[in-house]
Amino acid sequence: MNDRKALFLFDIDGTLILPGKTARRLFVEIIEQLTGKHTPLEFKHVAGFTDPKIVGEMLQRSGVSDDSVDQIKSSFFPKYFERMKLEYPVADDKIVYPEVQEMLEELRDSNNVYLGLVTGNMETTARIKLEPFGLNDFFSLGAFASDHPERNNLPPIAVARAEEKWNVKFSQDEVFVIGDTIHDVICAQVNGYIPIGIARRDDAISEFESVKATNVFREIPPAIMLKKLASLE
Ligand SMILES: [Mg+2]
């Protein structure tokens, strides 16, 4: 009998959803409010990075002195959460990728399949981002930038939570990290887990090649393919 199981850990931005510009705009506005300096934020500054890292990098670019960084960071997040709660739900530039709902329903209804999140968002904002699409119900747990600012430290936290919650033990080749950037791939590789790269952008293909990612798809594969990849089918 096949007693294999699989834990699929999903990144959020660029993987399950496209969050639109609200979060990035709020980063710029709130940093400006706190430092008096306008610090632009481009895709290359955010993709794959955790929120605390993004804020730290912005403060560095804005020339804030090292002594005030921690203090500004701690004022940043409460303001960011508050405004995300108000502004994200009404933003009209966010989408959930079309294959996501059915894929998650099928995985949820499959035997020996477990679901979680690994994201550079703080948990508060991860939940705000997923809520309008009804996706929080699929993810009772995960690891977030609020657990650790380094993405590479997050997958083992999610695995430990899953093992505790469901009273199971996952071997390294039963853990899959699904994401749209090389940072998702690397955080799987350094922990001995299996990365699945989602190359929605054209230039993502060569980026994934540069870190020797082997499981690369243009969108998230259907549940049946993910289960085959995990040797469950
Ligand atoms: Mg992402």
Image (cartoon, grey):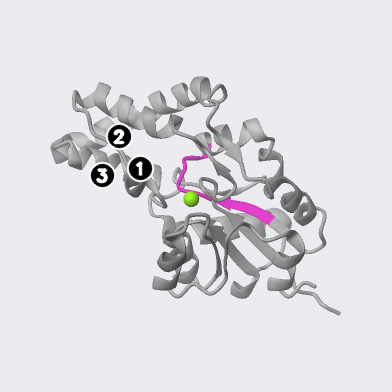
Q: Nearer the viewer, residue 24 or 68?
A: 24
x and y percentages locating residue 152 in the rendered image: 43, 60
Q: Residue at x 66, y 39 (%)?
A: 136
Q: Is residue 63 above or below residue 37?
A: below
Q: Is residue 124 above or below residue 148?
A: above
Q: Amino acid at mark 3?
A: Glu
Q: Is residue 81 above or below residue 194?
A: above
Residue 114 among magenta residues = no
Element type where label 2 sits in the image:
helix
Q: Is residue 118 left or right of residue 72?
A: right
Quadrant where the C terminus lies? bottom right
> According to the image, label 2 marks what residue?
73
Kindly check if marks 2 and 1 are in contact, taking CB atoms under 8 A apart as contact.
yes
Q: Amino acid at mark 2?
A: Lys
> According to the image, label 3 marks what residue?
57
> According to the image, label 1 marks what residue?
52
Q: Nearer the viewer, residue 103 or 219?
A: 219
